[in-house]
Amino acid sequence: MEKKTWRDIVKKKGKEKITVLTAYDYPTSRLMARTELDAILVGDSGGMNVLGYESTLNVSMEDMETFVRAVARARPPQLVIADMPFLSYEISQEKALENAGRLVRDGANAVKLEGGREMVDIVSALVKAGIPVMGHIGLTPQRFLRIGGYRTMGANVEELIEDAKALERAGVFAVVLENVYAESAEEVTKAIGVPTICIGARLWCDGQVLVIHDILGLSEIRPYFSKVYRNVGEIIESAVRDYVKEVKEGTFPSRENYKRKDK
Ligand code: KIV
């Protein structure tokens, strides 16, 4: 499969739904590489799903670099988008450029950062330096303290459209809409020329993104809008129970497991 670029994502707007999932490690990326998925988001949600942090505020550049390198090592044909972690881009354009550059050198093909109008100078600087950027508005989890929790956003649709348009002017190739009212997501999708990729914002978007641990039944808390496609969590638990049982009762290892050596 040919390597996808941000242009392939943009071209799908209004024609074909865009599919995005998170991944944080090599085996998941290797498996995703065999599918028709459009893009892999190395999300800072890996902080909770893989590292056990309480929120994305604890995720460091070093954490993100480890995730990005592991995902990139599988050489997936999908566009690999890396989240810029909390305070890795807000402080100054220089800091944002330096940190986005680190993620690109680690193997990311684009970066994502949270925020609307207030982020346009940062987005422009990254785009000018040749780094494709994805925006993220609506519920921005890195700001949950200021927001006062993880709430549905976008009641003021004009503000949301303003943010999306400002990001588009600054050069983003797509915008994530997280946890916004369905009607607002639909209006933003109609108002901008780049794709909207939604999570928890219903159907009227150009694409969807979900967290891989949620769809595999591996996360501790699954958002109400997600769906368990296969319960790998249950499979792991029962495999571990079977292994413990067989070792204790002496049925593993058996001759069967050593067949090739016995020949
Ligand atoms: O980190 C993440 O998983 C995300 C998605 C929720 C969009 O940013």
Image: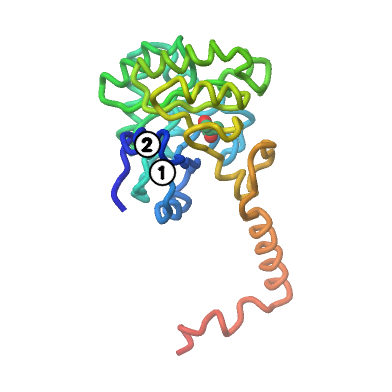
Determine if the C-beta at disc 1 is less than 8 A from ligand 1: no
Residue 9 position within the rendered picture, expressed as x and y whole percent measured from the top left = 37, 36
- At horizontal 49% and vertical 28% (from top left) the residue drawn is 176
Q: Compared with residue 256, is residue 11 higher up or lower down, i.e. above or below?
A: above
Rendered image quadrant of residue 57: top right
Residue 9 circle label: 2
Residue 33 position within the rendered picture, expressed as x and y whole percent measured from the top left = 40, 52
Identified by mark 1, the residue type is Asp
Q: Is residue 207 left or right of residue 155?
A: left
Q: Is residue 185 left or right of residue 171?
A: right
Relative depth, front residue between 193 and 140:
193
Q: Residue 95, can we see it?
A: no
Relative depth, front residue between 135 and 92:
135
Secondary structure under badge 1?
A: loop
Relative depth, front residue between 258 and 50:
50
Residue 38 circle label: 1
How has the structure been colored for display? rainbow
Q: Residue 168, can we see it?
A: yes
Q: Is residue 128 left or right of residue 260?
A: left
Tell which residue pokes out farthest to the left in this image: 129
Identified by mark 2, the residue type is Ile
Q: Are marks 2 and 1 in contact (CB under 8 Å)?
A: yes
Secondary structure under badge 2?
A: helix
Residue 246 circle label: none
Disc on the earlier residue, 2 or 1: 2
Relative depth, front residue between 10 and 217:
10
- At horizontal 47% and vertical 46% (from top left) the residue drawn is 25
- At horizontal 48% and vertical 87% (from top left) the residue drawn is 262
